[in-house]
């Protein structure tokens, strides 16, 4: 097998288990979009244009209660701000790539694709003796997620109404995050960052426009840096 | 909201999101991250996912709900233990869902 294809398929394979959380997420979005009165084609298009699950879910929830464009725009703008941090953390790994690659990978930089790809970048160092093909792995992660997101949106739009609420399929979303978190906290000195971010998310829950999430992540970062400085294990 | 207005709003949100995602990749294409930013990077993923998870588990309609008989946080705890022991995403989701059904039946 060609090494590029092998890397791509490895990315697809490692991203695959996460789809168990992505499918209900996408379906919930589809169901929510119909309930909010969004035309089906607009809802499907949004999954390609916005391509950010948490934000899309919030958008349809806000539309359903009649929120205006400004609060919806502000909320999703703040909610998605964390992607800029993902972008920063992935920047050094994709610097050597041509611009078309960087644009494509930026478009695919979602929570779940980022989490799997960054683990690969941080755990598997670049090989010395042959070209670094880890961007193909990243592409495999992003592509898998993109495809599932489009298909599960469509599934939610088409037959979402027939999934009983008592099944709690939405619970698969935080479970995915918990699985990722356990892996990330094993690999990095991330415990302090995670703990403070989680507590701060609750402490600042009342802030409008999902501002609490932004504050929580920033405080988590500060705590993480402070903790690793204290341990003297910086870099 | 009219369909045209909604479409415009979604395109703006999509563009802003893409700008976020490309911003730092573009900015640091030809230079290295300063040391302090580099030190920050390793904490981005754990901080983000912890904040998202805490919100999913304990925030409902903008308010923090802490209840001893809420099944989801207990199921999340079981899932966290499985995740910690196995490092397996499928096992974590399976255990978490199973635990949720058990706790819902118990409480």
Image: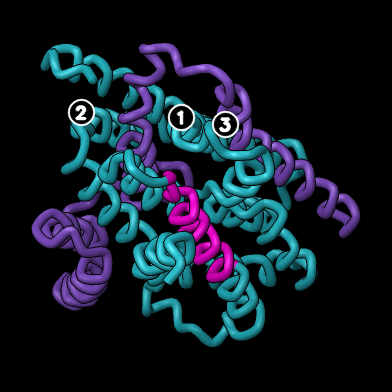
Chain colours: A cyan, B purple
Q: Identify the mark at residue A192; answer none if there is no mark.
A: 2
**Chain letter of the residue beneath label 3 in the structure image:** B
User: What residue sits 48% from the left and 71% below the top?
Assistant: A23
First to last magenta residue range: A131-149
Q: Look at mark 1 in the image and give the residue it sits on.
A: A92
Q: What secondary structure do most residues of the magenta stretch adopt?
A: helix
Question: Mark 2, mark 3: which one is toward the viewer?
Answer: 3
| Alpha carbon distance from label 2 to label 3 | 26 Å
Q: Mark 3 = which residue?
A: B25
Q: Quadrant of residue A31?
A: bottom right
- As drawn, the residue found furthest toward the front would be A129
Q: CA distance from mark 1 to mark 2?
A: 24 Å
Question: What is the chain identity of the residue bearing mark 1?
Answer: A
Q: Residue A47: where, in percent of width, then height?
A: 66, 61
Q: Quadrant of residue A71?
A: top right
Mark 1 vs mark 2: give the one in front: 1
């Amino acid at each position: 097998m060609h090494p590029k294809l092998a890397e791509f398929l490895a990315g697809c394979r490692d991203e695959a288990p996460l789809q168990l959380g992505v499918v209900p997420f996408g379906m919930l979005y589809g169901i929510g979009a119909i309930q909010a009165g969004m035309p089906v084609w607009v809802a499907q298009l949004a999954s390609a244009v916005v391509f950010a699950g948490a934000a899309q879910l919030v958008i349809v929830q806000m539309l359903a209660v009649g929120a205006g464009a400004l609060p919806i725009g502000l909320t999703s703008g703040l909610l998605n701000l964390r992607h800029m941090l993902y972008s920063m953390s992935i920047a050094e790994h994709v610097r050597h790539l041509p611009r078309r690659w960087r644009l494509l990978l930026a478009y695919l930089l979602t929570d779940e694709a980022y989490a799997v790809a960054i683990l690969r970048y941080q755990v598997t160092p670049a090989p010395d003796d042959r070209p670094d093909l880890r961007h193909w792995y990243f592409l495999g992660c992003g592509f898998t997620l993109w495809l599932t997101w489009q298909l599960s949106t469509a599934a939610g739009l088409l037959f979402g109404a027939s999934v009983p609420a008592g099944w709690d399929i939405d619970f698969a979303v935080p479970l995915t995050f918990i699985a990722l978190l356990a892996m990330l906290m094993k690999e990095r000195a991330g415990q302090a960052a995670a703990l403070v971010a989680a507590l701060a998310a609750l402490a600042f829950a009342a802030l409008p426009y999902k501002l609490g999430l932004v504050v929580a992540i920033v405080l988590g970062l500060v705590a993480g840096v402070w903790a690793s400085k204290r341990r003297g294990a910086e870099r | 909201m009219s369909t045209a207005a909604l479409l415009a709003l979604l395109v703006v949100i999509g563009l802003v999101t893409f700008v976020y995602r490309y911003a730092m990749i573009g900015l640091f294409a030809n230079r290295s991250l300063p040391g302090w930013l580099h030190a920050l990077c390793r904490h981005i993923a754990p901080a983000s996912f912890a904040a998202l998870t805490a919100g999913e588990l304990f925030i409902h309609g903008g308010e923090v709900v802490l209840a001893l008989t809420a099944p989801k946080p207990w199921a999340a705890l079981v899932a966290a233990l499985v995740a910690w022991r196995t490092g397996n995403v499928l096992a974590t989701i399976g255990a978490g869902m199973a635990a949720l059904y058990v706790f819902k039946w118990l409480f």
